[in-house]
Image (spheres, helix red, strand yellow):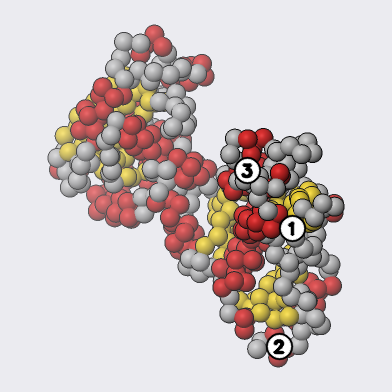
Amino acid sequence: MNALISDFPPLAFVDIETTGGNADRDRITEVAVITLQDGQLFEWSRLINPGVFIPKNIQILTGIDHNLIENEPAFSEVAREIYEQLEGKIFIAHNARFDYGFLKASFKRCDLDFRAKVLCTVKLSRLLFPEQPRHNLDTIIAAHQLMVSSRHRALGDAQVLEQFWKVCISQFGVSRLQESVKALTAHPSLPPKIDQKLIDAIPDSPGVYLFYAENRVPIYIGKSNTLKTRVLGHFSSALSVRKEMKLSMQVADIDWIETAGEIGALLLESRLIKEKLPSLNIKLRRSKDLCAWRFMPNDGNVIAPELVRHDDLQPGIQEHLYGLFYSRNEAMKTLQSIAKKNELCEGLLGLEKLVPGKSCFGFQVKQCRGACVGVESLESYHLRLMIALKKFKVSVWPFKTPIGIREGNELHLIDHWCYLGTAINEDEVFELLSAGKPEFDLDIYKIIKKFLKIIDKNHIVQLSRPISHDEYHD
């Protein structure tokens, strides 16, 4: 048996115990490495003082408490020794993403860049024993009658992995196991519950992808011009990026929706995130509480701001709108920032109460050029104000009608910056135009505004009437 085992490169069967599941916040309490090289086994394990509190449930599960580790070294003190135990070996662990990710993060804090070829025994079990309903470590122990010296302790669990390896060799032979290891380490970053066949089915074309946890709970939605490449990108960085590691450990299924191009992918992604509220996306806020500044001359012929609230707000129709903010507080802070940055008068902007004949406070501390007391002319002040506000201006809808943006065989319908939907034929266009205008959405506004600046004008169709077959396919 040993002669056959020696046909493999050096192997490291690894298990760790930790204070929790977050590699940034939690710390390692125990490491075990069983090396198999040239047919020889060598066991190494070490308790580690994590320097943080060990939760009671973890103490009960592992038997590792503060009394046990109070005189043990910190990870930084034994990092080089652990590194040498793993260096140059295939890293084998159960749910290897967790152990590898934790160790990599711990090494990084010690300025050590650890990299290894990784083999996950969950995936190995799925590949070689597909008839098993589950592939957690307890199931593998029971299914193959493995001996356990100490469950939920690093060395005991690492010994189980080494025993499982021997079972695989005895049942399938070295050649089959070599093929399996080669296949699995060729795609080391795929999550345990994601099959390579599913990845192979994803097209490398534009669209939106959806990651689901167990029970089809959405956890992440993204878009890309190359779906398969982007999905694999999540997993290839998962071993070093905490968010990607968390995503990879949770994902149990993947769906995707192809689109004709980048515009369609962006529009669909924005809509789906708001509808499904996946837990790992940055929450995109709905636009129901939007407000904006409207700048118009007041009775004193001074151009001054008025806050237009959601009920009275009509972006794309109203002129002289600036900003678009999710709250009054955000609007006030932005206006104050603009004033200070550009030496504008906070009194004339309504941010400070002016006393007739007296300057604003900003003029006294040289943060205002004195338009409030005639030191600066209103003409000069207004010119500087408009220049400062330019990048915040809400564009009026530049068309007299709804438009369609042609992308491949799809037509994205937009009216006053609102996304009506995407059509692939004349009937769908008519149905979307007849459905009424949806609520204004700030994210959609930004997407459409960006693309109208760069898109070929020949791809824009004005829709003042039901579109004809020739016009749609022009």
Which amino acid type corresponds to the residue marked 2 in the rendered image? Glu
Q: Earlier in the sequence, mark 1 or mark 2?
A: 1
Which amino acid type corresponds to the residue marked 3 in the rendered image? Cys
According to the picture, the residue beneath numbered tag 3 turns out to be 368
Compared across the picture, whether 303 is left or right of 267 comes to right
Under tag 1, what secondary structure? strand
Distance, label 1 to label 2, CA atoms, is 34 Å
Quick one: quadrant of the C terminus?
bottom right
Compared across the picture, whether 474 is left or right of 187 comes to right
The image position of residue 141, as x and y in percent, is 41, 33
Instruction: Please name which of the two marks, 1 or 2, marks the residue nearer to the observer.
Output: 1
Numbered disc total: 3
Instruction: Please name which of the two marks, 1 or 3, marks the residue nearer to the observer.
Output: 3
Q: Nearer the viewer, residue 451 or 362?
A: 362
Which amino acid type corresponds to the residue marked 1 in the rendered image? Leu
Under tag 2, what secondary structure? helix
